[in-house]
Image (cartoon, rainbow, N blue to C red):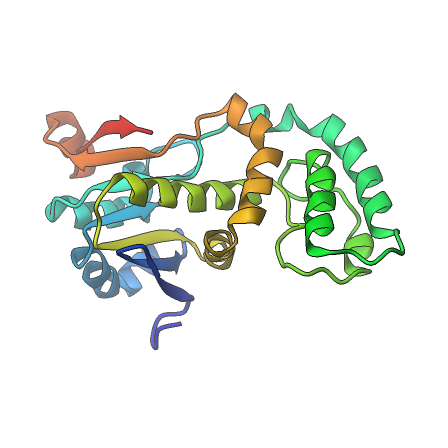
């Protein structure tokens, strides 16, 4: 956490890129309070990644539109790596996974045998296939809290967890495709640690990607790249104009 800034900042080197994950609050008042901080962070970047707001574009929101304006003035491209999905689509895959998830979890955690790292991951994968994919897991907390596990976050499931997995995966896709020296990510503060975790634990992330495959099938989960443009109607309505130039 930076002195004077209320949320966690995580910096790391990924290949040749300096990456910083910056937690935010989604409101205009918060932006105004730390405007100079955001200007400094964005102006020193080659590109930024913004959270995908629910049911609208980033330039239409009170908070992310302000970050967009800073990037727009400096001709800095914007990426979005978390998925675009309606809640109704996500809810469609819940019932069967809920039924299977509780049974598989109980079978895995009540075994008295010593669990190796490899077998533990196998069990996580089995459990994961049937775990509820929604905002919160339906699996009772008492079951999860009753054991000790070699990794954090493996039993964190739901739509938010799915987004964190996709954000981390998308970041790596961006860096594999583009040459970027300095990259900043701006997401709600609760995303900071999970994103960092999935960047550091590829095996767990790959298991989760397999688990959440049904969500990928019903929604849009490609990385989107936007560059500044000069559409008159956009400039009139939002004081910035962005062109979607690539999805990958």
Residue found farthest to the bottom? 3
Q: In the image, is 184 to the left or to the right of 150?
A: left
Residue 213 picture quarter: top right
Apparent side of residue 211 relative to residue 246 in the rendered image (left or right):
right
Q: Quadrant of residue 93?
A: top right
Give the quadrant of the N terminus: bottom left
Task: Report how many numbered discs are placed on residues in the image.
Answer: 0
Q: Height in image: 223 above or below 37?
A: above
Q: Nearer the viewer, residue 168 or 157?
A: 168
**Rendered position, 217 above or below 204:** above
Residue 93 in the figure: left or right of residue 245: right
Q: Where's residue 194, x and y in %?
A: 52, 54
Residue at 23 percent across and 45 percent down: it is 68
Q: State the image coordinates of residue 94 (x, y, percent, origin top left).
A: 69, 29
Residue situated in front as seen by the camera: 13 or 227 = 13
The C terminus is located in which quarter? top left
Q: Which residue occupies 64% across, 49% down? A: 156
Q: Is residue 27 visible?
A: no
- Quarter assignment of residue 30: bottom left
Image coords of residue 61 (percent x, y): 33, 41
Q: Is residue 142 left or right of residue 229?
A: right
The location of residue 15, given as percent across then percent down, is 31, 54
In percent of the image, x 82 and y 58: which residue is there? Answer: 114
Q: Is residue 114 visible?
A: yes
């Amino acid at each position: 956490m930076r002195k004077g800034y209320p949320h966690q900042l995580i910096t790391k080197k990924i290949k040749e890129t300096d990456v910083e994950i910056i937690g935010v609050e989604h409101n205009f008042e918060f932006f105004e309070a730390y405007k100079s901080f955001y200007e400094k962070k964005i102006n020193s970047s080659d590109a930024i990644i913004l959270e995908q707001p629910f049911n609208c574009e980033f330039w239409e929101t009170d908070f992310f539109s302000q970050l967009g304006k800073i990037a727009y003035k400096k001709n800095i491209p914007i990426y979005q790596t978390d998925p675009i999905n309606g809640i109704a689509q996500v809810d469609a895959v819940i019932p069967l996974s809920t039924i299977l998830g509780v049974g598989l979890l109980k079978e895995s955690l009540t075994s008295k045998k010593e669990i190796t790292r490899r077998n533990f991951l196998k069990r996580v994968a089995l459990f994961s296939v049937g775990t509820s994919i929604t905002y919160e897991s339906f699996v009772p907390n008492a079951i999860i809290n009753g054991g000790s596990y070699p990794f954090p976050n493996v039993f964190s499931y739901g739509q938010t967890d799915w987004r964190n997995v996709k954000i981390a995966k998308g970041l790596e896709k961006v860096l594999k495709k583009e040459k970027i020296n300095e990259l900043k990510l701006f997401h709600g503060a609760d995303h900071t640690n999970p994103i960092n975790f999935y960047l550091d634990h590829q095996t767990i992330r790959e298991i989760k990607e397999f688990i959440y495959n049904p969500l990928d099938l019903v929604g849009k989960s490609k990385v989107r790249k936007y560059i500044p443009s000069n559409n008159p109607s956009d400039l009139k309505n939002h004081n910035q104009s962005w062109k979607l130039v690539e999805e990958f």
